[in-house]
Structure formats: C-alpha cells, structure tokens
C-alpha cells in the first residue's frame, strides 16, 4: 500500500499577506481622503449658509425701515455666527415705478471677489413717498 502524502499548506505566504496589506492600505487612504474632502465641504457650506443669512438680514432691514431707497450702491460689514462678512447692496429702478429691485451680494470679509451669497428682492414704495 502506498501512502500518499498530501502537501497541504496551512496559512498564507508572505507575498499574499503583503498584497492584502497593500490593498487595505490603499482603501484606507482613499477613505481618509474622502473624509478630509467632506470636512472642507462642510466649512464651505457653513460659510455660504451664514452669508445667505446676512443677505436676508440686509434685505429685511431695507424693508423694515419703510423708506423709499434711492438707486445706488451701499456696502457694509456684518457679523454672523462668529464670522465677518462684507455685503454690497445695489438698488436699481424697475419699469414699475412702485418697486425698486435690491440686489445683495455677500463676500468673505477677509477679501476675495467671489460672492458667497447673492439675493435679489424688491422693495415697495410706501404710501406718500416721493418718486
């Protein structure tokens, strides 16, 4: 009787382990890059949200004053959520004499020409206001 001896391996070879570790490390690095990009996006979204609130505040103040705004450009600085924002308000006449269009752009106060928020609204002439 011949005894057949099977040559069975238990475990993995060193090459197999190294390939598996390389694949896992590449996957983890990709996941970290995605998580880091998401963190940057959250900061940008927070800035845009706060800038939108600044634009809404400026327009609400324009309406709450109850004044008939003269066409032109106003600008200022406003704080929102612990951040400073620069805003620019442009009042433009419309074909309807009872309305004025108000365009508000909000920028980071640290500088930059890129508007974080843009809002367009209308102000109605109050009764008794001159044209």
Image (cartoon, rainbow, N blue to C red):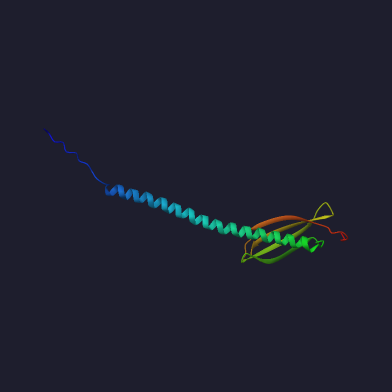
In this orientation, does residue 16 appear?
Answer: yes
Residue at 74 percent of width and 64 percent of height? 74
Residue 108 placement (x, y as % from top left)? 63, 63
Residue 110 placement (x, y as % from top left)? 61, 66
Residue at 51 percent of width and 55 percent of height? 37
Most distant residue in the left direction: 1
Picture mark count: 0
Q: In the drawing, does residue 34 fall left or right of residue 47?
A: left
Residue at 79 percent of width and 64 percent of height? 65
Task: Please tell me in which quadrant of the rendered image residue 116 appears.
Answer: bottom right
Above or below residue 128? Residue 31 is above
Most distant residue in the front direction: 1
Residue 113 placement (x, y as % from top left)? 64, 60
- Quadrant, the N terminus: top left
- Quadrant, the C terminus: bottom right
Above or below residue 117? Residue 5 is above
Residue 61 placement (x, y as % from top left)? 75, 63
In this orientation, does residue 114 appear?
Answer: no
Q: In the drawing, does residue 51 fall left or right of residue 2?
A: right
Task: Please tell me in which quadrant of the rendered image residue 52 appears.
Answer: bottom right
Task: Please tell me in which quadrant of the rendered image residue 115 appears.
Answer: bottom right
Q: Nearer the viewer, residue 4 or 40?
A: 4
Q: In the drawing, does residue 108 fall left or right of residue 26?
A: right
Q: Nearer the viewer, residue 61 or 37?
A: 61
Residue at 55 percent of width and 56 percent of height? 41
């Amino acid at each position: 009787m011949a005894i057949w001896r099977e040559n069975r391996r238990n475990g993995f070879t060193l090459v197999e382990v190294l390939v598996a570790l390389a694949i896992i490390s590449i996957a983890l690095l990709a996941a970290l890059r995605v998580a880091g990009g998401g963190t940057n996006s959250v900061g940008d979204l927070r800035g845009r949200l706060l800038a939108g609130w600044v634009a809404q505040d400026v327009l609400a103040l324009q309406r709450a004053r109850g004044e008939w705004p003269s066409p032109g450009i106003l600008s200022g600085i406003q704080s929102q959520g612990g951040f400073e924002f620069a805003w620019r308000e442009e009042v433009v006449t419309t074909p309807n004499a009872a309305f004025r269009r108000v365009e508000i752009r909000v920028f980071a106060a640290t500088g930059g020409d890129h508007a974080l928020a843009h809002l367009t609204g209308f102000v109605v002439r109050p009764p008794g206001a001159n044209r």
